[in-house]
Amino acid sequence: MGDSGGPYYYRYKQYAPSITVDNQGKPDRTGLLRLYDRSHWEAVRVDDIANFANWYAYYRTPTLMMRTVLSRAFARPGAKATGGGYGSDAVRERTSPTGERTARRRT
């Protein structure tokens, strides 16, 4: 792939052996040997990544639009837009057992 010219990057082949890790999630000795084995990597042209980036940017806009529409459609009337998503308030009021109103932040 490198001989054809143009920019490219490397990615781990799909069918290459899996990289084994220790209990902390770091590659162990066998995993490192597989990771640094040249035959387990393949070159990918940047054009493929550019195509994906264009596709993502194009289809992301309608998705964001639908999220906004759904948030507004299911929002409670008069609820403040807090960024909690789909019309939920980040802070909601509750009545305590003693009858006092308390505000509690959603998690």
Image (cartoon, rainbow, N blue to C red):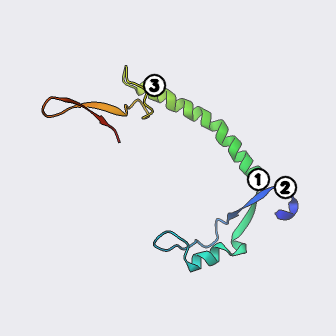
Q: CA distance from mark 2 to mark 1?
A: 8 Å
Q: Quadrant of the N terminus?
A: bottom right
Q: Which mark is residue 46?
A: 1
Q: Quadrant of the C terminus?
A: top left
Q: Which mark is residue 23?
A: none
Q: Position of residue 19 (x, y in %)?
A: 58, 72
Above or below: residue 38 compared with residue 6: below
Point out the tag, 3 or 2, that comes first from the N-terminus.
2
Report the residue marked by disc 2.
Answer: 6
Point 47% across, 29% down: residue = 70
- What's under tag 1, amino acid-wise? Val
Report the residue marked by disc 3.
Answer: 72
Query: 53 left or right of 69?
Result: right
For disc 1, the neighbor class at 10 Å (few under 14, some 14 to 19, many from 20) is few
Point 14% across, 29% down: residue = 99
- Could you say which is closer to the camera, residue 31 or residue 13? 31
Q: Position of residue 80 (x, y in %)?
A: 40, 24
Point out the tag, 2 or 1, that comes first from the N-terminus.
2
Whether the residues at callouts 3 and 1 have beta carbons within 8 Å, the answer is no
Whether the residues at callouts 2 and 1 have beta carbons within 8 Å, the answer is yes
For disc 2, the neighbor class at 10 Å (few under 14, some 14 to 19, many from 20) is few
Q: Residue 39 occupies which quadrant of the picture?
A: bottom right
Q: CA distance from mark 3 to mark 2?
A: 46 Å
| Mark 3 secondary-structure assignment | helix
- What's under tag 2, amino acid-wise? Gly
Above or below: residue 101 compared with residue 48: above
Q: Residue 35 occupies which quadrant of the picture?
A: bottom right
| Mark 2 secondary-structure assignment | loop
